[in-house]
Amino acid sequence: MTDGAEAPARTARGEQTRALIVSTAIELFRERGYEETTMRAVAERAGVALGSAYYYFRSKDELVQTFYARTHEEHLAASAEVLRREPTLRGRLAGVMRTKLETIEPYHQFAGVLFRSAADPASPLNPFSEPSRPVREQAVELFAEVVRGATDRRVPPDLRAELPHLLWLYHMGIILFWIHDATPGRRRTRRMVDLSVDLIVRAVAVTSSPLMRPLRTSLLRLLKEVEAAGAPEPEG
Amino acid sequence: MTDGAEAPARTARGEQTRALIVSTAIELFRERGYEETTMRAVAERAGVALGSAYYYFRSKDELVQTFYARTHEEHLAASAEVLRREPTLRGRLAGVMRTKLETIEPYHQFAGVLFRSAADPASPLNPFSEPSRPVREQAVELFAEVVRGATDRRVPPDLRAELPHLLWLYHMGIILFWIHDATPGRRRTRRMVDLSVDLIVRAVAVTSSPLMRPLRTSLLRLLKEVEAAGAPEPEG
DNA sequence: CATCAATCTCGAACGCGTTCGACTCCCTCT
DNA sequence: AGAGGGAGTCGAACGCGTTCGAGATTGATG
């Protein structure tokens, strides 16, 4: 699961209260956005005390994260179908990315907050952080499946092994773009996905040529370094 | 200048107070970090009222941004020397990036906050936002100078025109990495720069070949789209 | 049924960033 | 010199996220 180290819910009643708080919060977030939704308002509408909300969620951010984890699962589920259907790298990647956009679209309004804390090294939501490792690995695995099932491309093993990580990074970039995209229906991001998938498929083709081995090696060294940074280091 | 739309200082006395607040704030930020520095503490040590701090700076974040703009100017100055010295694309790019890291190193501790608000679409610090357009264009121009002065590479005009934007994006990525880099002296980021500059130079070489025109075109279309997103759109 | 500890609930209180309207200072114009 | 007014200063007050210790509820145990 995606929970990382989360707060209590050891009882049926507790579970119920917890769920009530989450759903109320999402309700309010969608009505008013993140900043305008106060913890007091959530507690009040949920019919619990302020302190109770904090019993289940260490912070307002964590409340958001909880529901964010849900959409992540939704995306996994929705992607499965696409991956069953599409045989080409292009189709699989584009499909997964489009599915992603559809999944998160309802929450665009307060996605900014997600990324805001995501960019904060101290935040557990930070995609490079230790707490989000399980989600990250799941996501990378999704892209591994994208690559694995693509029957139309010969990809050299060294690149094949690293491509999922690269695609995950790419997907984070698209999300960053998406957050800043104020066009109706996120038109621009969708175009962006089309263009970038095209580019990626071409680049993979080019990079797979034996002639490109030095370039590929250079790229792979870089990726290895990025991954190493994800792992912990003697802390300071 | 990098100020964008900033707050008052119409008087010699005002200028003095403003400067006093900034320097006191930086002092405290470096002593205690960002979160632990309160506006009240800044005001108190500076010997002004809380309200006065808010007379000059709309928010605590803006206080940080003000000083951040300074380091940006520092970097421009420091880069000039490198650009005079280095003739190769590799040398110029690596030099500029290393200079950047050296310039911002003293502020690594609370750089997280910068990026946190930088990732927020609503923040004026957001590198894609309208208020930061001047700084952004200045930075892109810096990379244009990196490319322009590189005498060792034949780069096709279409790519040459877009390369600066691409390098600027790349440089934002490195900063993101840097923020999360907890290694002493930012060892990892520096290695990252070496590896990525190597990759970029190779990629430029490869992509410049006439055979790669389709790939190049695909890349350029993508970049154009990114740039278009920077410009405003009928607002919602 | 009484006891006990764990779980859950509560809301007052704290410290923070930020706002606001009242006040003082100082320059300019007559 | 006096009046006017913009620039600068002040600090109480607001609303927020968060903490905390005290109390209520629950289910297992003797």
Image: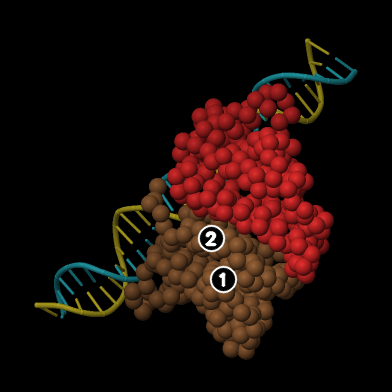
Chain colours: A brown, B red, C cyan, D yellow
Answer with the quarter of the image where residue A54 lies. bottom left
Indicate the position of residue B73 as horizontal and vertical percent values. 68, 37
| Residue ID for mark 1 | A159
Q: Give the answer, above or below, for where B231 lies relative to A69.
A: above
Answer with the quarter of the image where residue B146 lies. top right
Indicate the position of residue A47 as horizontal and vertical percent values. 47, 70
Report whether A175 appears left or right of B232: left
Q: Residue at x 46, y 49 (%)?
A: B182
Please, what is the three-letter code of the amino acid marked with disc 2? Arg
Q: Are marks 2 and 1 in contact (CB under 8 Å)?
A: no
Number of the label disc, if any, that sits on residue B21: none
| C-alpha separation, residue under disc 2 versus residue under disc 1 | 11 Å
Asked whether D18 or A163 is in front, the reply is A163
User: Label 2 marks which chain's residue?
Assistant: A
Indicate the position of residue B179 as horizontal and vertical percent values. 53, 50
Q: Give the answer, above or below, for where A133 lies relative to B184.
A: below
Report whether C3 appears left or right of B64: left
Q: Residue at x 54, y 41 (%)?
A: B105
Report whether C14 appears left or right of B83: left
Q: Give the answer, above or below, for where A142 lies relative to B2.
A: below
Indicate the position of residue B227 as horizontal and vertical percent values. 76, 58
Asked whether A10 or A32 is in front, the reply is A10
| Residue ID for mark 2 | A221
Q: Is residue A16 visible?
A: yes
Secondary structure beneath label 1: helix
